[in-house]
């Protein structure tokens, strides 16, 4: 694949670094959540954060090396990251609603009142980060394809030049 001069190297590296930062935050909040609240399935944010980190690393590598295999890997992992972000977004939103119903349904004393604020805060920040990661992963997948940023050396130009030559023949 020929990468043209208009290929957005800086955009791809910026999106990759953004995915790395978001993945680090998701992993940290996943660890804090599993330690603080004691989730039974607390490893989901950590595993999904690792997937986000993989997408970010591949995007940074793509901006430097620009190989066809990396393009396919970045698009694939970014699409998977966006799907994982959407799934965990829905899961955390349901979990947050479940906490709201548990905390509001009965008087659980001072222990629940102490944990209520941080639980909502951690889940709220994670939900926001997942929404941002969803958008960043989609933008990364759509801009890293390279097909729209080729010079006049792509296959489409060769086909159109051949048809123009055939049209000019008497």
Image (tube, grey):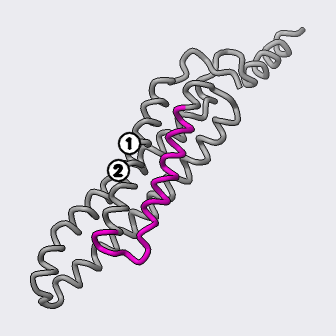
How far across and down, in percent of the image, does residue 78 sit? 54, 46
Q: How many discs appear?
A: 2
Give the residue at x 33% y 58%.
Answer: 29
Q: Is residue 146 above or below residue 31?
A: above
Which residue occupies the extreme left position in the image?
A: 110
- Nearer to us in this view, 55 or 115: 115
Give the residue at x 66% y 40%.
Answer: 72
Principal secondary structure, stretch drawn in magenta: helix
Give the residue at x 42% y 49%.
Answer: 23
- Please tell me how crowded label 2 is: few (under 14), some (14-19), or many (20+) other residues with Cα within 10 Å: some
Which residue occupies the extreme right position in the image?
A: 170
How far across and down, in percent of the image, does residue 100 sit? 22, 78
How far across and down, in percent of the image, does residue 128 sit? 30, 55
> What residue would you read off at disc 2?
25
Give the residue at x 43% y 42%.
Answer: 20
Q: Is residue 36 above or below residue 57?
A: below
Magenta-colored stretch includes residue 141: no
Q: Is residue 115 above or below residue 150?
A: below
Q: Which residues are magenta?
A: 35-60
> Which structural element holds mark 2?
helix
Residues at marks 1 and 2 touching, judged by CB atoms closer than 8 Å? yes
Q: Which mark is residue 21?
A: 1
The quadrant the C terminus occupies is top right
Left or right of residue 166, residue 50 in this image: left
């Amino acid at each position: 694949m020929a990468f043209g001069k208009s290929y957005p190297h800086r955009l791809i590296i910026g999106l990759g670094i953004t995915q790395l930062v978001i993945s680090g935050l998701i992993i940290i909040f996943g660890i804090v959540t599993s330690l603080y609240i004691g989730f039974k399935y607390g490893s989901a944010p950590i595993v999904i954060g690792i997937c986000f980190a993989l997408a970010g690393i591949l995007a940074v590598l793509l901006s430097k090396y620009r190989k066809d295999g990396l393009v396919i890997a970045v698009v694939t992992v970014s699409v998977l990251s966006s799907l994982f972000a959407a799934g965990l977004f829905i899961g955390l939103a349901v979990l947050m609603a479940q906490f709201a119903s548990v905390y509001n349904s009965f008087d659980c004393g001072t222990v629940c009142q102490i944990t209520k604020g941080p639980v909502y805060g951690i889940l709220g920040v994670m939900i926001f980060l997942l929404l941002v990661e969803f958008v960043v992963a989609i933008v990364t997948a759509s801009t890293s394809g390279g097909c729209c940023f080729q010079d006049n050396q792509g296959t489409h130009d060769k086909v159109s030049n051949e048809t123009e030559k055939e049209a000019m023949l008497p």
